[in-house]
Image (cartoon, grey):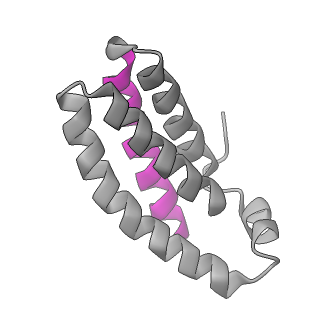
Amino acid sequence: MAAIFDEAGALERVGGDRELLRELTSLCREQCDDRLMLLDHEVRHKNLKAVGDIAHFLKGGLGNVGAEAAFEAAHSLELAAKGGDLEAIEGLNEALIEAVSEFFRLVG
């Protein structure tokens, strides 16, 4: 199981700049709030193309800030959507929401 937060990896990606990491994390939170609502809508409507696209977008932002478990959850959801796995996307969407929530609870 992936760590909730890979702080060392995230800091490495921003050259050790903690302030920049805080700013990126804040931006990621805003994007996640908006996109997770949209993602939930698309999951309910079984729009696999949109689900895959949104999961891909989220994966990038989450990876940049070291949200390892959430990154992996977004990646799994993206793959399921692109593979047409309707049965899996609901559960994977819930796993992504939980992983994102855990990450932001941890980092504040």
Quick check: is 43 in the magenta stretch?
Answer: no
Task: Answer above or below: position of 4 versus 89.
Answer: below
Residue 84 vs residue 107: left or right?
left
**Residue pictured at 33% horizontal, 54% vertical:** 35
Q: How far across and how far down the image is residue 78, in percent?
A: 48, 31
**Residue pictured at 53% horizontal, 29% vertical:** 76
Task: Answer above or below: position of 71 versus 81.
Answer: below
Looking at this rendering, what residue extends furthest in the bottom direction? Answer: 19
Main SS, magenta residues = helix
Quadrant occupied by the N terminus? top right
The image quarter containing residue 41 is top left
The image quarter containing residue 62 is bottom right
**Residue pictured at 40% horizontal, 44% vertical:** 54
Task: Answer above or below: position of 50 versus 68.
Answer: above
Please name whichever residue, 108 or 13, is drawn nearer the observer in this view of the structure: 13
Residue 73 vs residue 3: left or right?
left
Q: How far across and how far down the image is residue 36, in percent?
A: 32, 50
Quick check: is 90 in the magenta stretch?
Answer: yes
Q: Is residue 83 visible?
A: yes
Q: How far across and how far down the image is residue 66, in percent?
A: 66, 58
Task: Answer above or below: position of 95 versus 105.
Answer: above
Residue range highlighted in magenta: 88-108
Residue 3 vs residue 70: left or right?
right
**Residue pictured at 81% horizontal, 78% vertical:** 16
Q: How far across and how far down the image is residue 3, in percent?
A: 67, 46
The image quarter containing residue 34 is bottom left
Residue 74 vs residue 39: left or right?
right
